[in-house]
Image (cartoon, helix red, strand yellow):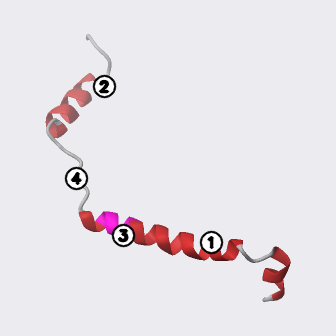
């Protein structure tokens, strides 16, 4: 027995995915950008409110 126990698995994965490329569709980038905007805009607005004033609104 030569090599490590994972040698056969490594060869299998390399043959199966040797020419695979990572392709991200443009719609995914749009979704990521929309998610960032949806998170950052309210956070920046909340940053301008003093903590005591924010608690008094509840």
What residue is drawn where x is 50% and y is 75%?
38
- Tell us which disc is closer to us: 4 or 2: 4
Crowding around mark 3 (Cα neighbors within 10 Å: few <14, some 14 to 19, many 20+) is few
Between the C-alphas of marks 4 and 2, the distance is 28 Å
Main secondary structure found in the magenta portion:
helix
Element assignment for label 2: loop
Question: Which quadrant would residue 5 be assigned to in this image?
Answer: top left
Image: magenta residue range: 28-32
What residue is drawn where x is 55% and y is 69%?
40
Residue 12 at x, y percent in the picture? 19, 32
What residue is drawn where x is 25% and y is 30%?
9
The residue tagged 3 is 31
The residue tagged 4 is 23
Between the C-alphas of marks 2 and 3, the distance is 38 Å
Residue sitting farthest toward the front: 48
Residue 7 at x, y percent in the picture? 26, 22
| First reached walking from the N terminus: tag 1 or tag 3 | 3
Q: In the rendered view, would you say 36 is above or below 7?
A: below
Crowding around mark 4 (Cα neighbors within 10 Å: few <14, some 14 to 19, many 20+) is few
Q: Do the numbered discs 2 and 1 sit on residues whose CB atoms are within 8 Å?
A: no
Q: Nearer the viewer, residue 21 or 35?
A: 35
| First reached walking from the N terminus: tag 3 or tag 4 | 4
| First reached walking from the N terminus: tag 2 or tag 1 | 2
Between the C-alphas of marks 2 and 1, the distance is 47 Å
Q: Do the numbered discs 1 and 3 sit on residues whose CB atoms are within 8 Å?
A: no
| First reached walking from the N terminus: tag 1 or tag 4 | 4
Mark identifier at residue 43? 1
The residue tagged 2 is 6
């Amino acid at each position: 027995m030569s090599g490590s126990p994972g040698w056969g698995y490594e060869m299998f994965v390399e043959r199966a995915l040797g020419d695979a490329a990572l392709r991200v569709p443009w719609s995914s980038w749009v979704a990521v950008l929309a998610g960032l905007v949806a998170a950052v805009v309210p956070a920046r607005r909340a940053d301008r409110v003093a903590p005591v004033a924010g608690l008094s609104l509840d």
